Amino acid sequence: MPRVRRSEADQQLVDEHGPDFSEALARGLRIIAAFGAERPRMTLADVAREVDLPRATVRRALFTLGCLGFVKSDGRLFQLTPKVLSLAAAYLASNGLSAMLQQAVEQIAAQLSESCSAAILDGEDVVFIARAGPTRLLGVGVDVGYRIPAYCSSMGRVLLGGLDAPDLAAFLDRIRPAPLTPHTLVDRTSLAAAIHRDRERGYSLVDQEAEVGYRSLAVPVRRYDGRIVCALNAGANVDRVPVERMLETFLPVLREAAATLGARMI
């Protein structure tokens, strides 16, 4: 059987990790990750284009995922099934941190009457691992597992502040900041300065950089040795909550919760 054509990214992974690296598993996970809010259903050709793999390879992977119950098709369009949630459930069930954080964000959301989240750094993004809101509905698609670029989010900047100088420099050199809104900070020098400033003051306030009309405030949650474990965030509509109220009311609540959580972390 002829070998599957490797993209430059695939070849780099194989070169980095050696012969034990499972390309087939990696392709399957890439295919699952290709689906999302903008691509809930795709044809075989669509999937092949998104993951940059031959159609025959993608067909076999989709067939396998279908047999396992992770993907379904009407004969033309493919989409994920709820069984994919079992992958996230396995992480949440095996990670006591998520349960602890979920309780905390629910309490904060009830106290502030605004949405509250906790996230960790994963590559160039932050990933929500706990999320809660008040009686008003949360934003569509924003839930546990949601990802947002680290460079333009308050939680991201708090987490980036926990990196040492070489790792932060490598991160800033690697990313390609895009202006998600007219307010997004994209200059790397300015981003580095913002991250260092937020590290010094112990919180990050990001105003409409990730989403127009939305500002958020985040603080680090540190364990006993000072290492940042995750970020805790509260956000609100700019017309409803001014910056002053965030700093005067939200910040003490977040800091108190972060201190309580940190004391419970090993």
Image (cartoon, rainbow, N blue to C red):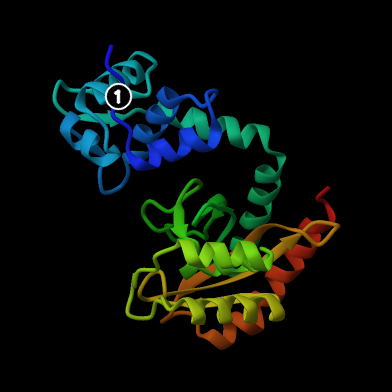
Determine whether, in the image, residue 114 is placed left or right of residue 95.
Answer: left
Residue 38 is situated, as x and y percent measured from the top left of the image, at: 26, 49
Residue 14 seen by the camera: yes
Please determine whether, in this image, residue 94 is positioned above or below residue 248.
above
Determine whether, in the image, residue 182 is placed left or right of residue 204.
Answer: left
Q: Which part of the image, by quadrant, shows the N terminus?
A: top left
Q: Quadrant of residue 229?
A: bottom right
Residue 126 is situated, as x and y percent measured from the top left of the image, at: 52, 56
Binning the other alpha carbons within 10 Å of mark 1 as few (below 14), some (14 to 19) or many (20 upward) gives few
The residue at 43%/26% (across/down) is: 23
Determine whether, in the image, residue 10 is placed left or right of residue 248.
Answer: left
* Residue type at the position of mark 1: Val
Which residue lies most toward the bottom here? 244
SS of the residue under disc 1:
loop
Residue 111 seen by the camera: no
Identify which residue, 232 or 132, lies in the foreground.
Answer: 232
Identify which residue, 185 or 239, lies in the foreground.
Answer: 185
Identify which residue, 218 or 11, lies in the foreground.
Answer: 11
Please determine whether, in this image, residue 26 is positioned above or below residue 37.
above
Residue 193 is situated, as x and y percent measured from the top left of the image, at: 57, 81
Q: Quadrant of residue 237?
A: bottom left
Q: Identify residue for label 1.
A: 4
Determine whether, in the image, residue 156 is placed left or right of residue 213.
Answer: right
The residue at 79%/64% (across/down) is: 259
Identify which residue, 74 or 158, lies in the foreground.
Answer: 158
